[in-house]
Each structure stands twice: as C-alpha cells, then as structure tokens.
Amino acid sequence: MDRLSRQLEFVREADRLKGVLRHTELTDPARRENSAEHSWHLALMALALGEYAPAGTDIGTVVQMVVLHDLVEIDAGDLSVHAPAAAQAHQHAAELAAADRLFALLPADQAAALRRLWDEFETRESREARFARALDRLLPILQDVRAGGAAWRRQGVTADQVLSKVTLIADGSAALGEFATGLVAQAVTDGILAPPAAGDPGPGR
C-alpha cells in the first residue's frame, strides 16, 4: 500500500497543473490555456501527426514525454518562449528543482524511469525527444494564429522571434518545420504578426 500511496500522491499533485495558466490564448471560450490542457493537446498531436516524425520514432514514447514535460510548471510556472535569456536561465533552474521534488513523490523505480523521460525531452537526445519538442513549439504557433495573434501582440513578438523557434520544429520534423515557416509568413501577410525587426530577411527567406 505504501507504493500505491506514493503513486496516488503523485497523481494528486499533478492535478495542480490544471491551475497553471500559459501565455497562449484560446478562442472558444476566450481565455488563457492551462498547462494540463497544453499537455493533453500535445499528446493528441503526437497521435495525429506521428507520420511526420523521423522513421523509427516510437510515438508511444513521444506521448509519454509530452504528458510529463510540463509537470514542473506546478512549481516553476509558465514562461514565454520569447522571454529574455536571463529569465530563461532562471526558469531552467526552477524546473530542475521542481523535477527533483515531483518525481521523487513516486516509488524509486517509477521516479527514475519518468525522470529519464523528462530529462531526455529537455536535452533532445533522441528522435522521440526532438519530435516531441517540435510539437511543443508548433502548437502555440497554431493557437496564436487561430486567436488572431492576441498573445503575439500582448508580448510584442515579431516574426523573426517566432521563426527562431521554427528551427527547432524543423530539427524534429522537416515537414512540420516547412509548414510552420509558411504559417509564419501567412501570419505576417494577414497582419496578425509583426514583420521581422529591421535587418532581418523575413519569413521564408
């Protein structure tokens, strides 16, 4: 029963992820997304878009990674991918500490196995991790487009900033990277994403 008690404590603690708000805007209903919704949506994307992963990718492992990857936001909160480098470094340290605490709630064997998956996602050391990270970067772009660029405008994001994240998408899936590049270019054309800063060649160039 001690094993079951620890597993249930982990599950109960994970429920707190539903209260962590992200920077991404939803359109129906109009509100900010929470991190648990984001993780579920990524798992669904992995199942729906698995054919665009590199050959030999284990989609089951990808699903596990995306379900686990943002649990650390229970302690660390969400930070925009466009935040300054200093804030990103602080967030990384907070997430590592959160991973230490949260996975330790589980029995030792499960804690080690799930922590390995979380670390693998972070370091992108496998094709599964690279595809999972590609989905994690693509989904907010899809949502920002659907919401008419609301989050982009609120954060003052420009096309070159979004395109810098597309590189990571292409690293995990060439097809999804190409699609994302076109999506950014169309967002600029539609006026929902600010054009690149002066001196940047712009999307698709």
Image (tube, helix red, strand yellow):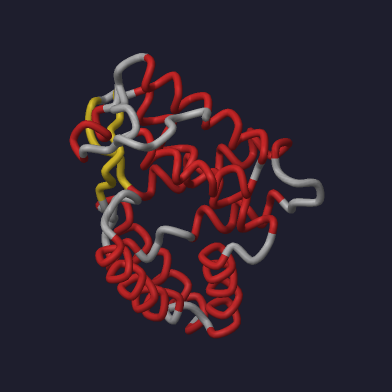
Frontmost residue, 17 versus 155: 155
The residue at the point 30 percent across, 35 percent down is 198
Q: In x, y percent, where is residue 130?
A: 61, 54
**Residue ID at (44%, 81%):** 104
Q: Give the x, y percent position of residue 184.
A: 44, 28
Q: Is residue 103 above or below residue 125?
A: below
Comparing 29 with 168, the one in front is 168
Q: Position of residue 67 (x, y in %)?
A: 50, 54
The vertical placement of 20 against 199, above or below, is below
- Give me the residue at 53% from left, 78% from top: 111
From this viewpoint, which residue is outermost toward the top?
Answer: 190
Residue at figure coordinates x 30%, y 73% from the top left: 94
Q: Position of residue 42 (x, y in %)?
A: 51, 43
Q: Quadrant of residue 51?
A: top right
Q: Residue furthest left?
A: 154
Q: Is residue 62 above or below residue 122?
A: above
- Seen in the picture, residue 162 relative to 91 is either above or below; the reply is above
User: 179 or 76: nearer the eye?
Assistant: 179
**Looking at the image, which residue sits at the far front?**
199
Q: Nearer the viewer, residue 26 or 85?
A: 85
Indicate the quadrant where residue 163 lies: top left
